[in-house]
Image: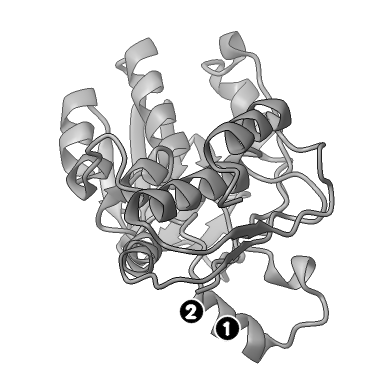
């Protein structure tokens, strides 16, 4: 069994909290985001109708992960008069943070604890949830088209999550090879079926080695993640009596996030496995 973990290079833009609710300022900031969202392009004309129209204080958030849902909750907490809508293509929320506890069978973490529906948080915090995939973003006319209909907005927040950068990590690989690896060795960093597949692979693991490949360069979401997964797999092998090694192929040894703490625990607890 081989599990290859890959993360997208990510640009990060920060904003002062006090500025978040100055609607005009946020709208201006949103205008500088490049139009690179997959599947989104400028359309030929405005939609004939909208499932929701901007009210003057309308915020549409694309993406229902941790970032998008936290933004929706905090906006309503700060100002209940803001009309907040979350658009997400998935029909269920699943947390990638703390999922290693579930994958490794630690602390009685269950799949049920990692997942929930989108509708109850929306009702509790007072925002609207719409299930749909964005097909168009028109920044000039301030609307988006989705598979569930069109929405206009005063402020647009893009929080679509990560994507895997196999091409950048393995530039000599063909598209066919990338596809085979992605299906055979799910990274389980995009919540959903990948986590279930990796859990099944762990439970069916035979004696042998597991190879983990952290990103070779650039920034990526959650720098400790490859090394947390290393410890998780080693712990699972140890508690299940599986013979083998977790091999980390890292181009920057000793320079990764929380390196001293990880190395200390590996040497103390998993010296025979990592």
Give the residue furthest to the bottom. 176
Q: Are marks 1 and 2 in contact (CB under 8 Å)?
A: yes
Q: Position of residue 99 (x, y in %)?
A: 38, 45
Horizontal side, residue 44 vs residue 58: left or right: right
Horizontal side, residue 154 vs residue 195: left or right: right
Q: Position of residue 221 (x, y in %)?
A: 62, 43
Badge 1 crowding class, 10 Å Cα cut-off, few under 14, some 14 to 19, many 20 or more, is: few
Badge 2 crowding class, 10 Å Cα cut-off, few under 14, some 14 to 19, many 20 or more, is: few
**Residue 203 picture quarter:** bottom left
Q: Position of residue 17 (x, y in %)?
A: 58, 13
Between 138 and 8, the residue placed more toward the observer is 8
Q: Say the numbered circle drawn on residue 75.
A: none
The answer to whether one can see residue 64 in this image is no
- 76 versus 116 height, above or below: above
Horizontal side, residue 183 vs residue 119: left or right: right
Q: Position of residue 263 (x, y in %)?
A: 67, 34
Q: Name the residue that disc number 1 marks.
A: 179
Give the residue furthest to the top. 18
Between 236 and 24, the residue placed more toward the observer is 236
- 106 versus 184 height, above or below: above
Q: Name the residue that disc number 2 marks.
A: 183
């Amino acid at each position: 069994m081989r599990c290859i973990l890959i993360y997208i290079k990510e640009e990060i833009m920060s904003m002062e909290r006090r500025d978040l609710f100055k609607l005009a300022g946020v709208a201006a900031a949103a205008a500088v985001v490049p139009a690179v969202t997959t599947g989104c392009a400028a359309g030929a004309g405005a939609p004939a109708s909208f499932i929701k129209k901007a009210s003057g204080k309308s915020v549409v958030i694309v993406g229902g992960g941790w970032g998008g849902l936290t933004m929706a909750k905090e906006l309503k907490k700060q100002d209940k008069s803001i009309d907040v809508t979350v658009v997400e293509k998935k029909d269920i929320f699943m947390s990638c943070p703390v999922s290693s506890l579930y994958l490794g069978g630690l602390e009685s973490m269950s799949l049920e604890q990692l997942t929930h529906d989108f509708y109850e948080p929306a009702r509790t915090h007072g925002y609207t949830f719409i299930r749909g995939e964005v097909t168009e973003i028109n920044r000039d006319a301030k609307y988006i088209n989705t598979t569930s209909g069109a929405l206009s907005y005063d402020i647009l927040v893009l929080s679509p999550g990560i994507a895997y950068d196999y091409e950048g990590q393995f530039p000599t690989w063909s598209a066919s090879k990338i596809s085979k690896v992605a299906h055979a060795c799910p990274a389980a960093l995009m919540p959903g079926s990948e986590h279930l597949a990796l859990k099944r692979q762990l439970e069916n693991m035979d004696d042998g080695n597991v190879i983990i490949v952290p990103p070779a360069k650039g920034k990526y979401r959650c720098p400790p993640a490859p090394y947390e997964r290393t410890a998780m797999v080693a712990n699972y092998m140890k508690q299940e009596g599986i013979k083998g090694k977790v091999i980390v192929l890292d181009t920057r040894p000793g320079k990764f996030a929380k390196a001293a703490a990880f190395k200390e625990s590996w040497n103390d607890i998993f010296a025979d496995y990592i």
